[in-house]
Amino acid sequence: MTKKQATKALLFILILILCLLGVNRALFPFSEHDTNQTKSFYETEADSVDVLFVGTSLMMMSVNPLRMYDDTGIVSYNRACSCQSPQIAYLTVEETLKTQNPKVVVLAAGALIIPYDYEFREPFLRRGMDYKKISRTKYEAAKDIAEQSGGVQTVQSYFFPLLRFHGRWGEVLVNGIDSFEYEYDYLHGYYATTQVVPQEDISGERMVSSKEYEVDENTRYWYGRLIELCKENDIKVLAVGNYDLRWTAKKHAVIEAYCEEMGIDFVDYNYEPMKSQLGINLQTDMYDLKHTNIRGSLKVTDSLAYYIRDKYKLSPSKTSDSVKKQFEEDIAQFKNDIAKYNEKGFVVSW
């Protein structure tokens, strides 16, 4: 092969790669909340986060880091996401520790007993994985997810989404290419909703349910690694039973036994005195049976923020002026949003 032929071949390969990257981006579904949450976290000042929240949407919609900062002066970040799998929970904590040194990691306890359907929940898995940085652990997580899905998903597709989303041509042609416009997540990972769906209190009848639960082998492996990683870095781990009208006594017992076995703390907001401490109004504070709206989340955050502060003897975060200024601006923006919600009939006060 001559030098001229080699140059042409190299140029062809480069053009092909650029075309594939362009098509890959065009077919890549853009998830507004998950993308903004992940990218905003990557821009967070190093060593500024003292409390990290991980887990499923129950945590994501219950804990507002802006409120926690306003209450206690403690800087936190909510890196929970919808249907967060054990692999993604571990990946999230590990990559967090590359830039942050939290004193406490808070887990959504209910995630420990979810019988995870990796095929059915694939959209949520991808939203939790797709925008995370490439790393060895991301590969390990993708590999295990592919195995747990029974081969329906592949490791490669988590790094080259074109391999999974090549069938989106019709959707893209009709609706256009996703904008991929990243916006700063001023809520620090919290997901806010003003939707109100009044609920009946079925907690009593659910508490006596005979359905059995367990922390399965796969969950034990990944959460075991997560907990061990925290212990190695002198980080306290707290599992939280998020307020959930579907909660049962058997769930509580299994999670309590697991936490005792693993040497981590557990607090359950479905039991007294924590439950009544929230003061949740089922007619105004719930989005559905298990998720709170903004009104409910402010109540949950108030209780949990002070609980964490007192239990782990945390002082207000020693952080830079720029971080303090950012929180002040973000709180002001959220208060402005609240004023708009009030005008539209969703009455809530900061």
Image (cartoon, grey):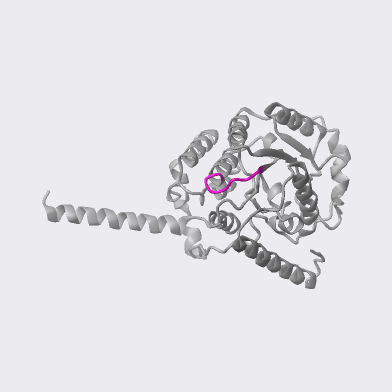
Main SS type for the magenta part? loop
Residue 101 counted in the magenta span:
yes
338 up-or-down from 245: above or below: below
Q: Position of residue 350 (x, y in %)?
A: 79, 63
- Does residue 213 show up? no
Q: Position of residue 123 (x, y in %)?
A: 57, 48
What range of the chain is rendered magenta?
97-104
Q: How many marks do you count on the picture? A: 0
Of 292 and 123, which appears nearest the observer?
292
59 up-or-down from 263: above or below: below
Q: Is residue 89 left or right of residue 197?
A: left
Residue shown at the point (68%, 38%) measured from the top left: 237
Of 3 and 278, which appears nearest the observer?
278
Residue shown at the point (65%, 44%) measured from the top left: 103
Q: Position of residue 274 (x, y in %)?
A: 84, 43
- Does residue 298 show up? yes
84 up-or-down from 282: above or below: above
Q: Is residue 114 left or right of residue 225?
A: right
Of 262 and 110, which appears nearest the observer?
262
Q: Position of residue 134 (x, y in %)?
A: 45, 46
Q: Is residue 215 left or right of residue 19?
A: right
Residue 38 counted in the magenta span:
no
Residue shown at the point (75%, 29%) measured from the top left: 254
Residue furthest left in the image: 2
Residue 197 falls in which quadrant of the image? bottom right
Q: Is residue 97 left or right of residue 112?
A: left
